[in-house]
Every structure is written in structure tokens, then in C-alpha cells.
Amino acid sequence: SKRRGAVGRHAHAVYLPSACRCACCAQESFQRHKLFKYWLQSFLAGVPTVLVGFRDERGTVHELKSFDTSTMHRLVRGAGREPYWEPAACINFGKGVLEWLLASLAANPAAAHYVMRYEPRQSAILLLRRDGGGGGGGGGG
């Protein structure tokens, strides 16, 4: 089903993060990383509005800015006007990871313990089996 906005008990919820508005923190980084994080958390929780408090190096909030979760992705464009991230691609990636995880777990012993880890150098998500004694990893994915 297509999700048009928050309904029910989350219809009036607001997410209230803060972000650094310092000389060291670029607007591009905010759009690429922070807005993505705020969008994803709010979208999955059904929270329609994100109210960001922009703070200085000492932590004092000097500005508040409201973002609508359903349109936030339109703000994240690079210099070439290409989007940094697309909502559908992000959700599809998450869906693929969860499907892979379920299939991997179904193919392995139920009593085993696993750790899922992202390895940036390999651009891979690994599923490591932990032995009962808490020792090393194994298996992969």
C-alpha cells in the first residue's frame, strides 16, 4: 500500500534532532547524511515533521527549521542537481538486506548466534556466526 502521510497516533508527532551549524560542518554534508538519517527514522516511524535545531560549537541552538518528511528528499541535490539519495532506492535496499538476512538465517542453525556487520572496504554486509563461547566469527554472506 502506498504511504501518503502519517495517520493515527503519529499524525501530530514531531522528531526534534539538533545539528551543528559550524564553520567545520558543510551544508552538503548536512543534506547528504543528516537529512537522510532524519528522513529515514521519521519515515519508518510515521512521523510527518522533523524540526531541526541548528546549534553552534558550544551547543547553543540559534535557529529552528521545520522539514516535511514526505518532501524532504527534494532538498538533497548536489552541484550537478543529482539527488544524493532517493527514497525508493533506500527502501528497496533495506528490503533487499532484510530478505537476504532472512534467507541466510533460514539456511543456518537456529540455535547459533550471529552478528551482522558492514565492511566499507569491501562494500559488503557480512553475517558472521558467533560460537556459543563468544569467540571469533565465521560464515559470511
Image: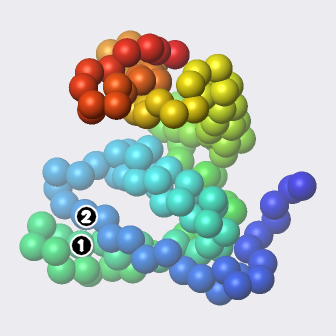
Q: Are marks 1 and 2 in contact (CB under 8 Å)?
A: yes
Find numbered disc 1 in the image and state the secondary structure of the residue it sits on.
strand
Q: Residue 35, position in %: x, y?
A: 47, 55
Please give left or right for residue 65 compared with residue 103 in the image. left
Residue 130 is drawn in which quadrant? Answer: top left
Mark yes or no: residue 33 visible: yes
Q: Amino acid at mark 1?
A: Arg
Q: Amino acid at mark 2?
A: Arg
Please give left or right for residue 54 compared with residue 68 in the image. left
What residue sits right under mark 2 in the picture? 21
Q: Residue 31, position in %: x, y?
A: 44, 50
Image point 49% across, 75% down: which residue?
15
Q: Residue furthest right?
A: 1
Residue 123 is drawn in which quadrant? Answer: top left
Please give left or right for residue 133 compared with residue 59 in the image. right
Find numbered disc 2 in the image and state the secondary structure of the residue it sits on.
loop
In the rendered view, tell whether residue 99 sits above or below residue 11.
Answer: above
Q: Which mark is residue 55?
A: 1
Image point 18% across, 80% down: which residue?
60
Q: Residue furthest left?
A: 58
Residue 115 is drawn in which quadrant? Answer: top left
Mark yes or no: residue 89 visible: no
